[in-house]
Amino acid sequence: MKSITKFITILFLPILLTSAEYDPNSILVQLHKNVGRTIFESTLDPQKYEIEKVVVKRLGIYKIRLSDSNLQSVRDAIIELRTNPWVQAAQPDHKVTPRVTVPDDPEFSDQWALDNTGQGGGTADADIDAPEAWDITTSGVTMLGDTIVVAVVDGGMLTSHSDLQENMWVNHNEIDGNNIDDDDNGYVDDIYGWDAYSSDGSIPNDGHGTHVGGIVSARGNNENDISGVNWEVKLMAIAGSSGNTSTVLEAYGYALDQRVIYDSTNGDKGAFVVATNSSFGVDFADCSAGDYILWNNMYDALGEYGILSAAATINSNADVDTQNDVPTGCESEYMVAVTNTTRNDQKSSGAAYGATTIDLGAPGSNILSTYSNGGTSSLSGTSMASPHVAGAVGFMHAAASTGFAQYYRNSPSLAALEIKDMLLAGVDTLESLEGITVSEGRLNLYNSAMLINGMASADSLDPNPVTELAAATPMDNKVVLTWVDPTELAGGDPISPFSVKVYRGETFVSTVPAGTETFTQESLPGNIQYTFSLITALASNDSTSVPAMIRVTPTGEGCMRGDATLDGRVSIADPYRVLQFILGYREETDLEICTSDVNYDGALTIIDFLMIVDLMNSP
């Protein structure tokens, strides 16, 4: 009977494989219980198979890459591996089609920016793919339980709007109207946010700000009005988008203070602010000039706590690269500059651009959202485009894997830049934005959510990363890292023996034994910023943690002549490394050129190789 079953399985396998699309270059296998990777890998023909990654460690599921799919089909590979005594099951790696989640809000069909079906003369799918993204999540909470908040810096907001009220951030540690700073956060009666115009907790009603807030996070699927980019992310209302720079800075400062308080109290007070929206600015002002330096400094300060700031560019067909703007001409890495696209995926003729300054486009023409009259209204402009991006940042935090959420908690400033990169990497490329924006595309919520959902996905059996990572520069050209080792796996079980691997940039530097909790790097050229990554690695298998990362700039100048491998000494490995550079086997970095070009002629030649050999042999 067993042989008949196998015959039937093989007979019908071609039919099964054609029932859905699948990856022609890989298959999935599940090993029998208690079968380890090493013993299974020893039975594989390396000319035919390569273990690409562990998919589900607890179930023993692996992704196997076919070395040459032209020589062996998926069908043949499955037949062969099903006969492997260590394999419990084998199947194709099928393609999965995204499903869509459509809210029941009565005016959703008019929200072309979220789901463009061609309504109003638009181009079908010229949208941010919101329904596809909502099939990933509609939550307003991270995988670690943090309630996500987007701060809307504008003219105010109708906090009692029926489609916003449930999503308003509320400071539950403050008693409204008693004129006392109950939570001791430096702000009196700040229930929903702050009014930087009058420096109090009263939030004025404002049509523009209410509209922007609805784009970010009008309550979705509540049978009321519209849906925001997010269904449940919280809105912090901050009035302070016009007047003087001092007003704007006070407004931003409130959002920053709440995030600092949140982090310092482990979430007991403050707010988990991940993004701000800025639909305002100073047209044609030069952010690089000293007169506007505090704008850039504020965005950097927000970024250090993991807050990205979405900013609307000028509402005119201007080149910000040459004509300037504040804030979208500012250089801060943590500011995301946004222009306006139409329902036909064209850049609006009334929106600015810039190949090096404007990051991406987002829908901003004839956008339906909540309004100060308690209903809805359509508005146009870059002011409507940027809140789609601010909302996307909030959404990405909801969609992020547990591993990425932990990475963000450990290294918020670096993780925020990763989020920005994924925003730009996920765009739909548009001809109308090619050559005139950094990403050359329009926001796609689904693509970016998928990127962050798959990044740093941690199995419950993977180790946690190190915590409390800090860097000191006690003397020139020296960096000392300290941290606290993990004690548990991602799933909460006690951690097994491990070590900590240290990387500088993408270069592996050292393996530090558990319990050491410090690492020193010497002979680093000064006044250069370095990124160190620490990864926990279990000794028993190939499990690793998400990285804990920190950036540091040591003092001092120059670099260590002859230290081509950047390990703080000149050894036999250094001339060999220079030879690899000379022959083109490796691509050298600026730092490696500095250490390897020992005769200072601007080129790496055999002379440098010989001189390093002499240095190595010098007493």
Image (cartoon, helix red, strand yellow):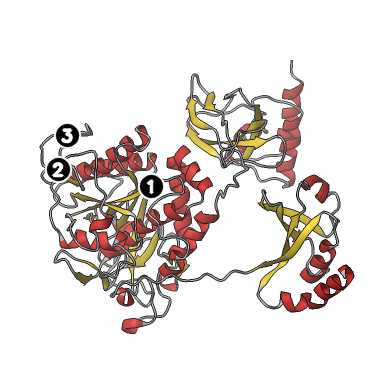
Of the numbered discs in the image, which one, if any, rests on residue 176? 2
Residue name at image x 57 percent, y 39 percent = 505
Q: Secondary structure at mark 2?
A: loop
Q: Tell me the residue that label 1 is attached to.
A: 334
Q: Is residue 529 left or right of residue 603?
A: left
Q: Secondary structure at mark 3?
A: loop
Quadrant of residue 498 within the rendered picture: top right
Mark 3 nearby-residue class (10 Å; few <14, some 14–19, many ≥20): some
Residue name at image x 44 percent, y 73 percent = 431
Mark 3 or 2: in front is: 2
In primary-sequence order, the first of circles 2 and 1 is 2
The N terminus: image quadrant: bottom right
The percent coordinates of residue 65 (x first, y second) are 74, 59
Quadrant of residue 378 within the rendered picture: bottom left
Q: Tell me the residue that label 3 is attached to.
A: 181
| Mark 3 → mark 2, Cα distance in angstroms | 10 Å
In the rendered view, tell whether residue 449 sits above or below residue 486: below
Question: What amino acid type is highlighted by mark number 2?
Answer: Asp
In primary-sequence order, the first of circles 3 and 2 is 2
In the rendered view, tell whether residue 324 sits above or below residue 556: below
The percent coordinates of residue 225 (x first, y second) are 25, 70
